[in-house]
Image: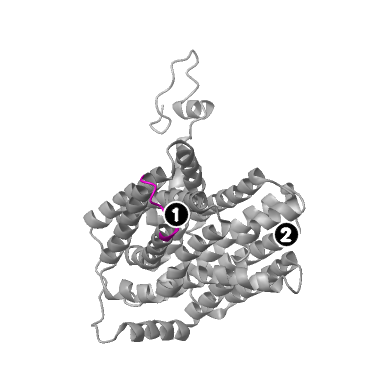
Amino acid sequence: MSESEGPEIDNPGGLLPLTASAEVQGQVPPRLLRQLLRRAPEAAQIPLFRNYVLGLAPLALGSWMQLVALGYLTLQVTGSAAAVGLVGAADGIPAVLLSLPAGVAGDRHSRRAVLMGASAAMGLTALGLALAAALDRATLPVLLGAAICFGSADAFDAPTRQALVADIVPSRQLMGAAALTATVGSVTRIVGPAVGGVLLATLGPASCFLAMAFSVVPFLVVLLLSHWPVVPVVAARLGTVRRMVEGLRWSRADAASRTVLIASLALGVLGIGYMPYLPVFNRELLHGGGQVLGLMYSVGGIGAMVGGIGLSLMSRRLRQDRLLLGSAPLYALSLFGLTRATTLALALPCLAGISLGFLGASTAMLTVLQARAPGEMRARVLSLYTLTFAGGGPLGTLVYAGASRIVPLFDAIAGGAVVVGLILLWSGSHRALRRLN
């Protein structure tokens, strides 16, 4: 018996090697496991990146739980749907106002220090909100203040985190790293609201905020104990505004970055702006209730998770331009199809396709910016990318609301889907992106 076959199971003919037994018992065959490991992103073999992902996962889970609880508590305290929207806007506005200054901070100071400060602010805000909820002190001003604190911390967190990943992962491995982090985000997007709902029903909103506060700890530990690379910082010869302008000028001058940022703005405005109208889709096209709406949101998370796993396994062979070219028609046709779906059986595949297309397009664009931007400019360039989504989504919602006064809402969104698809195709076929490969 060869060593590769392993020891045989005690049976009369001695014909079943251990590998066959594993398949019979439903276990993963060693050969399949080895193939999966060979296809896994190379970034997963970097210990520092693995620590980063392990620390990030609890934080992402806590963030989704906190998001669910914040809306629930606002409605419980005020009884007003308008107040829920106001608190949601309070969370998003700081991202629009602070993204560019946050990019300057991420380039001017230690990225680890910026992330530790942002994470600590999130944890302390969540802890204060947990106390306010437990003591029945969670008034609307308190909730608005907490939402502003969360949004402000996130404005500094997002571009600095993305820049930090590019500091520790080689350029050729960035797509796999982005796919892995997207997979983690998709899993927490599915699990977080479910766990948050259970905690809300059993222990109340304070428990969700407390869970958010504790979820910050693993990420802080990773940031504190790991040895992060030191990125050279240019001497502080420029003020904040001039540094912001410097980042804008570099992004405009670099053809690949400029092309990607235009595409991300289109995707942020016309591609994400439809999301607040999902309840309208549910009511007017599908004639569904709360369970159908919940299923629609869940399918989006499942589609993104499946796409993230697929991208992770294929990341070694994918090119950014081809990924963007493939994602463009998938996203556009899926969003267009959703506006024409009249049954749940038609709507669910469209929602999954939207998630897959968005994940592919955003992964391609993010990796281009991470790889192109110089280390001392990286956070500022990535702050522009986060700004296109943070500000583009609310702007797109307003654009569709205005367009619905002229044409039916679903026709306006269908037109937006076509425009997004064309711009993504233009970006993916641009010679600046083709030259990167």
Q: Amino acid at mark 1?
A: Leu
Q: Locate residue 405, reporting x and y percent.
A: 73, 72
Between the residue at mark 2 and the residue at mark 1, the CA separation in whole angstroms equals 28 Å
Residue nearest the viewer, comparing 64 with 303: 64
In terms of sequence position, does the residue under pointer 2 or pointer 1 come before the other?
A: 1
Most common SS among magenta residues:
loop
Q: Is residue 209 above or below residue 367?
A: above
* SS label for mark 1: helix
Which quadrant does the N terminus fall into?
A: top left
Which labelled disc corresponds to residue 337? 2
**Residue 16 makes an appearance in the image:** yes
Question: Is-magenta flag for residue 139?
Answer: yes
Q: Is residue 130 above or below residue 121?
A: above
**Residue located 33% across and 67% down the image:** 167
Image coordinates for residue 153, horizontal then vertical, percent:
36, 64
Instruction: Tell me residue 353's x, y (percent).
Output: 64, 56
Whether residue 298 sits left or right of residue 119 in the image: it is right
Viewer-proximal residue, 218 or 198? 198
Residue at 46 percent of width and 65 percent of height: 90
Residue 290 lies, in percent from the top left, at 64, 45
Residue 39 in sight from this viewpoint: no
Q: Give the amino acid at mark 2.
A: Gly
Using residue 330 as the reference point, say whether residue 225 is left or right of it.
left
Tell me the residue that label 1 is attached to: 180
Q: Which residues are magenta?
A: 135-141
Contact (Cβ within 8 Å) of mark 2 with mark 1: no
Location of residue 9 by image quarter: top left
- For disc 1, the neighbor class at 10 Å (few under 14, some 14 to 19, many from 20) is many
**Magenta stretch encompasses residue 214:** no
